[in-house]
Amino acid sequence: MSSHKLSFTKVAEISDVPVGKMLKVKINQNEMLIANIDGTFYAMDNKCSYDQEDLTKGALKGNILTCPKNKAEFDVTTGKNVKGPKMMLFRVKTDDLKSYELKIDGNDILVHQASSWGM
């Protein structure tokens, strides 16, 4: 187990992400989304694992985010794919998304990019 201190990066402020909404953010070349579910914030990759669609353009209902293009569904609290994309009359399998450790410091939302929860 590593004893080094985790490094977090400020990506937004609490007021930037109202309850039930999402925000696209970038750390270096990594695009992720921040979701506010009932006042708790979560961070995960922003590109659909099936076709790289921008997930912040999708629908967020509770903790389930639906891809705007293929209707794949992801749990924003874990990054898990809960329903595969719909192709014609069938649903196909796609990968889970990477989730990131997040913490709140005052009004700031901070993300640790190297961590992965729910994978």
Image: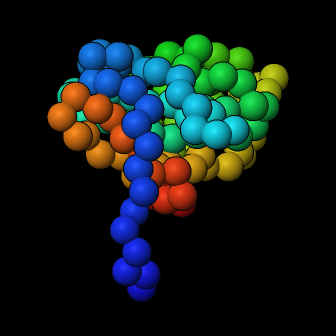
Residue 30 coordinates in the image, percent (x, y): 65, 40
Looking at this rendering, what residue extends furthest in the bottom direction? 1
Q: Is residue 103 left or right of residue 22?
A: left
- Going 25% across and 40% down the picture, which residue do you hit? 104
Residue 34 coordinates in the image, percent (x, y): 43, 30
- Going 57% across and 50% down the picture, which residue do you hit? 98
Where 61 falls versus 45 (above or below)? above
The answer to whether residue 23 is seen in the rendering is yes
- Going 53% across and 23% down the picture, which residue do you hit? 24
Image quarter (top left, top right, bottom left or bottom right) of the C terminus: bottom right
Q: Which of the 4 image quadrants contains residue 77?
A: top left
Image quarter (top left, top right, bottom left or bottom right) of the N terminus: bottom left
Residue 17 coordinates in the image, percent (x, y): 34, 19
* Front residue (pair 70, 51): 51
* Front residue (pair 68, 105): 105
* Front residue (pair 26, 62): 26
- Going 29% across and 32% down the picture, which residue do you hit? 108
Where 35 falls versus 28 (above or below)? above
Q: Which of the 4 image quadrants contains residue 27?
A: top right
Residue 87 coordinates in the image, percent (x, y): 79, 27
